[in-house]
Image (spheres, helix red, strand yellow):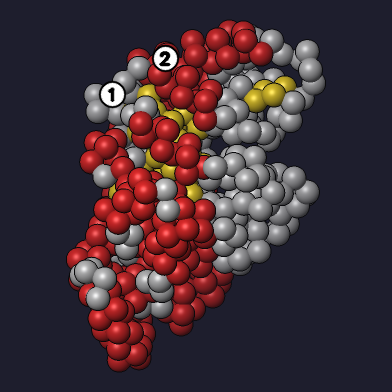
Amino acid sequence: MTSPIEAGVIERHNASLRADHEADFHSLGERLARRGLDADALVDKVARFTVAVPSWGTGTGGTRFARFPGPGEPRGIFEKLDDCAVIQALGRASPAVSLHIPWDKADPAELKERADALGLRFDAMNSNTFQDHPGDPNQPLSYKFGSLSHADPAVRDQAVRHNVETIRIGEAIGSRALTVWIGDGSNFAGQSDLSRAFDRYIESMKRIVEALPEGWRVFSEHKMYEPAFYSTVVSDWGTSLMAAQELGTKAFCLVDLGHHAPNTNIEQIVARLIRAEKLGGFHFNDSRYGDDDLDAGSIDPFRLFLVFNELVEAGERLDRLEPAHMIDQSHNVTDPIESLIRSGAEIRRAYAQALLVDRAELRGLQDEGDALLASDRLKAAFRTDVEPLLAEARRRAGGAIDPIRAYRASGYRARVAAERPAVAGSGGGIV
């Protein structure tokens, strides 16, 4: 297996931190033991939890108004895979990459060969019918007024064919799922028939489901707004659930933490989707006002913890669903590699904290109506500093105790900045 990180960087880094880390891990282990918890068992569970990184997340994002490129941005999918391999080598939380077609379209054999060489695999595929593709001969028609729900059957046919093409590429590289998000909607009341648009979406999605290979799933992603600001065809979890139930056993709902109105109780949505056996997975990020796509855990880590509290509580019900986990962020002012490393750690942090909750005690307090102590037990888990567990999981897997410090010490960004031509700034475009 090849690695874009120089051999010995991680070893030297870990050697300099090992004594302090071992002391911290031992201290935490003693405190957890007093609560009846085994630190080594928790490390094993954390190490088994992984989250895919998005290929597009390795580039600098932007807003409707501007994008400010960073140094050494990847110029194509193979350089994106190199960056993803750096994230995995250091953080050891992200062995899988999620591709976006046609952005990442390439010869499947070459994609598979490069991923294998880097020790990576491919997660859910993502189709793209939310923008036009003038350079793609397979998508000559415009999606300005919709795709899978478009009034023109020719546009719907094109959008369906694109999704089927994305499935075929994914099948060739070892993926087993397709995520469908559409930007279909309207900006003016009366612009679109709300019921007929949804009917057309369901009709199109049924054709996509029929094209799924054996063992594949399709994830319907909802989004409250953007780019359509009056109505969105798949606007909320209820609409997504309705679609998944009508589309059958291969269809599931995908929850993006940023695609909700402020103060929405996302953890309750997660609990409901688990009960309905339609939770397909997550796109992890964070938000302050709306669909901000900020780094996971950077604004509201307690909400992230509460989501994982529901996942751990679900136990075997969740195991049967095998939800997919992926980061979906726009890195506008940070090094994308650093943000993705940190987000992988923050997601694992929330999971580790949720593992600390004494489930039997919590259920007893809930049944007794002891609101204060029930809340306190959750907060006690959330307040626990589990960083030594995360660091030990990384170290045992060959990663870095402090991955961002190790990344900076590696000089990787400076090296690829010298190899990859600088990208000029652009006037806008949401990534």
**For the residue marked with disc 2, what is the amino acid?**
Glu
Q: Quadrant of the N terminus?
A: bottom left
Camera-nearest residue between 386 and 364 = 364
| Quadrant assignment, res 374 | bottom left
Compare marks 1 and 2 and give the one earlier in the sequence.
1
Q: Tell me what residue is drawn at x 24 percent, y 28 percent.
A: 215
- From the viewer's perspective, tell me whether residue 322 is left or right of residue 340: left
Residue type at tag 1: Pro
Q: Secondary structure at mark 1?
A: loop
Vertical side of 259 occupied by 191: above or below: above
Crowd rating for badge 2 (residues with CA inside 10 Å; few <14, some 14–19, many 20+): few
Task: Assess whether mark 2 and mark 1 are in contact (beta carbons under 8 angstroms).
Answer: no
Disc 2, SS = helix
Residue 136 to residue 381: above or below: above
User: Percent from the top left, x then y, of residue 17?
Assistant: 35, 88
Residue for badge 1 = 213
Residue under the point 62% across and 8% down: 196
Q: In the rendering, at what x and y percent does residue 92 appear? A: 33, 64
Residue 180 locus on image (x, y percent)? 48, 29
Residue depicted at x 40% and y 71% = 384
Whole-angstrom CA distance, mark 1 to mark 2, is: 19 Å
Residue drawn at point x = 19 percent, y = 66 percent? 41
Q: Which mark lies nearer to you, 1 or 2?
A: 2
Residue 325 in sight here: no
* Residue 230 seen in the figure: yes
Of 92 and 122, the residue lying toward us: 92
How crowded is the residue under tag 1: few (<14 C-alpha within 10 Å), some, or many (20+)? few
Q: Which mark is residue 372?
A: none
**230 to 123, vertically: above or below:** above
Which label number is shown at residue 246?
2
